[in-house]
Image (tube, rainbow, N blue to C red):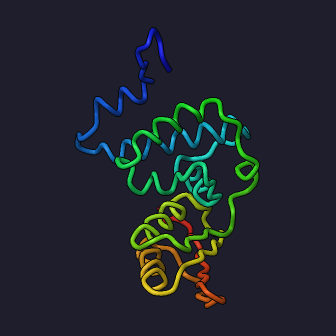
Amino acid sequence: MEESGKKIESPIARWINANRGTEGFAESLRKLLMYACVEWIRRGTSALLTPEEALSKIVCCALPQFPVGEWAETPEKYMDEIADFCEKAKTLPLPAALQGEIPSVLDLRGVKCPLNAARSRIVMSGYPAGKTLKIWLDDGSPIENVPGSLVADGHKVLSREKKSNYWEISVVKLNSIV
């Protein structure tokens, strides 16, 4: 936005510039992104999701114009994109992919380690308890490391199946023990 030749920063951009480099900044930026996801979905569907659920749904939908999973993995690297998304989420129409149920497949083929483990953990943190998610992974490190990271988080890997040129694992989020 410009006024008399001067660029006007949004409140979010000002906050990012004022807090960049402070302790806990990456986590605060990730939370900001999550709350923008909540608001975007709420405004488009009237559904009220937790921040983790909203982020999970958007990452699972894999919208190429909004690589939210990538942004959430390394938020400081994508500060400008996150600030822009937070502003746009206030008025952007909600894509059809986000208007239905959360997808049951997460395609992580081509996502390098350890980002595939990080992205699968982000999705599972907001995935509905008791629901099974199929995750598609490349051969090698991804199939060796991702299932273990999910089990370490308390999820159950139900199956591992080799497909033509990738692996499919089925993971269920167990009910939280309180």
11 left or right of 66 in image: left
Residue found 53% across the figure and 65% down from its top = 124
What residue do we see at 51% from left, 56% from top? 69
Q: Residue at x 40, y 29 (%)?
A: 13
Horizontal relation, residue 20 to residue 30: left or right: left
Quadrant position of residue 131: bottom right
State whether residue 142 is above or below residue 14. Answer: below
Q: Is residue 118 left or right of residue 45?
A: left
Residue that protrudes farthest toward the top in the picture: 4
Front-most of residues 58 and 77: 77
Where's residue 9, x and y in %?
42, 23
Is residue 97 shown above or below 123?
above
Residue 120: give x, y in percent of width and height: 50, 67
Residue 86 percent across, percent down from the top left: 52, 35
Q: Quadrant of residue 173?
A: bottom right
Number of dots carrying numbers = 0
Q: Using the image as rendered, state which of residue 83 and residue 22 is in the foreground.
A: 83
**Left or right: where 107 falls relative to 18:** right
Residue 145, horizontal then vertical, whole percent: 42, 81
